[in-house]
Amino acid sequence: MPMKKRSVRALAIMLLLPGVVALAAGGDVPDPWGPARFLLGSWTTAGTAKAEEGTGTASFSLELDANVIVRRNRVAFPPSEPGKAPAVHEDLLVIYPQGGGFRAIYFDNERHVIEYAVTFAGEAATFETANADGPRFRLLYRLLPDRTLASEFYIAPPGREFSLYLKGAARRVEPQSPASGERDGRR
């Protein structure tokens, strides 16, 4: 057998063997999305916001064969004047694993693009930028004991500390389902 074929075969065996051994031994493959599963599902504003603050919906779902979590968010604000159309904010956030941790990228209809490092602790998530040259952003999610999802968004101008820009709360309107990423009954 030529050397090149043996090298390719050896490489394939080295790459596949640990997975085959784990499956044969009945080993459970760890769930990479375990720390983020509390976010999955559809959410609506909790009803505590004032009318002028708008009403909104958001959904977090596993997509692309469970390789990413996608958050879609839409908030409608009442018209500023009678007869005017409501203002609408829409955004998309994609969370993905990278280098043993998580990252995310955010896009909105105002043409903002924000890249985040993401950490999870219990039923909380922190999204934070590391931009040293411009403004920095921090987005926090916490699942409260009453199952309300609290969110806070902070901005830090260059050379300054973070200050709260906006906060909100949402209630789950659609429980997590197998279609949204539940696996083996884990939550």
Image (cartoon, grey):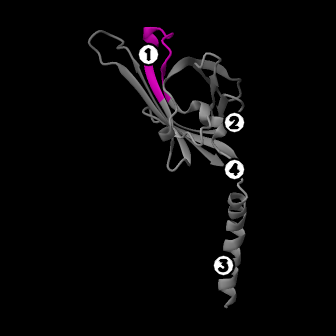
Q: Residue at x 59, y 41 (%)?
A: 104
Alpha carbon separation for disc pair 4 and 3: 28 Å
Alpha carbon separation for disc pair 3 and 2? 37 Å
- In this rendering, the label closer to the viewer, 1 or 2: 2
Q: For mark 1, what is the residue? A: 54
Residue 129 visible at all: no
- Marks 1 and 3: CB-CB under 8 Å? no
Between 180 and 72, the one lying in front of the other is 180
Any mark on residue 119, and which?
Answer: 2
Determine whether label 2 and label 4 are within 8 Å by CB. no
Residue 113 at x, y percent in the picture: 52, 38
Q: What amino acid does circle 4 point to?
A: Asp
Task: Please tell me which of labels 3 and 2 falls first in the chain.
Answer: 3
Q: Which mark is residue 8?
A: 3
Nearest to N terminus: mark 1 or mark 2: 1
Mark 4, mark 3: which one is toward the viewer?
4
The residue at which mark 4 appears reads as 28
Question: Mark 1 or mark 4, which is nearer the start of the sequence?
Answer: 4
Q: CA distance from mark 2 to mark 4?
A: 23 Å
| Badge 3: residue crowd in 10 Å (few <14, some 14–19, many ≥20) | few
* Pick the front one: 109 or 157: 109
Which portion, as a residue range, is magenta? Answer: 42-58
Mark 4 vs mark 1, CA separation in Å:
44 Å
Dot 2 or dot 4: first in sequence order is: 4
